[in-house]
Image: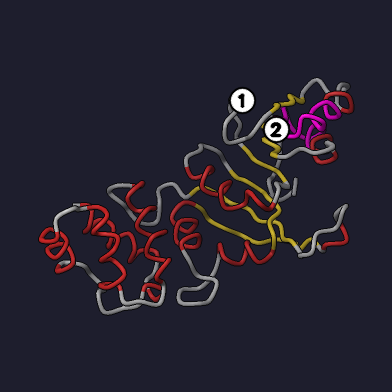
């Protein structure tokens, strides 16, 4: 993970869900500072005791999505699997060089799924818009304690600057993509109807919008990320 993140002595690294600090200690030897975030108060106490000999480790108590902590330029972490989706979306709005994370293998595959495949969904589209995603070594379940029921994989995310395509309204784009994938097998013109009705109250306005929807004969699952961007730009105009 440290190699994938290309750590240097000038890096400030965010470690989310630091646990007992094994990864934190390893990182601290290779960078300027580690921000070790832990939500479990019992583990926070243990972390502060076990890592008190490391002056470049800052233990942050609380939920990573809610607490304040100093700026960082890299993320190296083995987060809880139950926050994987929320963590990806949280990272959309952050300024950093790269994130190296361990995810459940099935979740990681969704980040790089091909258009139309079973794993292809809103997460694939949004991740493509924001990040260059690379999969590295697999992490078998026996390497964890206690061992999970699934295998894992190391994933590197690098922000795309600039993004591969332009969207006029980022929040609208995300909302549209997530909503349409709840009807992934429907034609776009039908799937977009319920979304439009929630956005615009009047039926006449809804009908007007649908008339100009691109890709209306294709299935939602058949749209490439760029197609969703075009669709969002038309609807948000």
Residue occupying the point 18% across, 53% down? 201
Report the side of 47 relative to 68 (left or right): right
42 or 227: which is nearer to us?
Answer: 42
Residue linked to disc 2:
37
Compared to 157, does 149 lie above or below?
A: below
Compared to 219, does 131 lie above or below?
A: above
Label 1 residue SS: loop
Compared to 27, does 118 lie above or below?
A: below
Report the side of 213 relative to 51 (left or right): left
Residue occupying the point 50% across, 59% down? 123
Where does the image place residue 36, in percent across and percent down from the top left?
73, 32
Label 2 residue SS: strand
- The magenta span reads 27-47
Magenta-drawn stretch contains 39? yes
Residue occupying the point 79% across, 36% down? 24
Contact (Cβ within 8 Å) of mark 2 with mark 1: yes
Compared to 150, does 29 lie above or below?
A: above
In the figure, residue 50 lies in which quadrant?
Answer: top right
Report the side of 30 relative to 86 (left or right): right
In the figure, residue 235 lies in which quadrant?
Answer: bottom left
Mark 1 Cα shell of 10 Å, populated few (<14), some (14-19), many (≥20): some
Magenta-drawn stretch contains 104? no
Residue linked to disc 1:
69
67 or 95: which is nearer to us?
Answer: 67
């Amino acid at each position: 993970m440290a190699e994938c993140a290309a750590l240097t002595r000038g890096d400030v690294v965010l470690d989310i869900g630091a646990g007992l600090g094994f990864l934190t200690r390893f990182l601290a030897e290779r960078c300027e500072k580690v921000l070790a975030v832990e939500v479990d108060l019992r583990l926070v106490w243990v972390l502060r005791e076990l890592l008190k000999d490391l002056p470049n480790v800052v233990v942050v108590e609380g939920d990573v999505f809610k607490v304040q902590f100093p700026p960082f330029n890299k993320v190296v972490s083995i987060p809880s699997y139950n926050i994987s989706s929320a963590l990806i979306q949280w990272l959309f709005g952050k300024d950093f060089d790269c994130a190296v994370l361990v995810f459940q293998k099935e979740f990681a595959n969704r980040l790089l799924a091909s258009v139309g495949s079973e794993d292809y969904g809103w997460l694939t589209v949004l991740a493509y818009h924001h990040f260059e995603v690379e999969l590295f070594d697999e992490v078998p379940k026996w390497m964890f304690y206690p061992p999970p029921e699934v295998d894992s994989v190391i994933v590197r995310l690098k922000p795309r600057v600039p993004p591969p395509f332009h969207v006029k309204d980022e929040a609208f784009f995300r909302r549209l993509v997530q909503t349409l994938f709840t009807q992934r097998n429907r034609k776009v013109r039908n799937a977009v109807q319920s979304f439009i009705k929630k956005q615009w109250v009047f039926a006449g306005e809804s009908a007007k919008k649908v008339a100009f929807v691109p890709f209306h004969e294709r299935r939602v699952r058949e749209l490439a990320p760029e197609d969703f961007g075009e669709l969002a730009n038309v609807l948000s105009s």
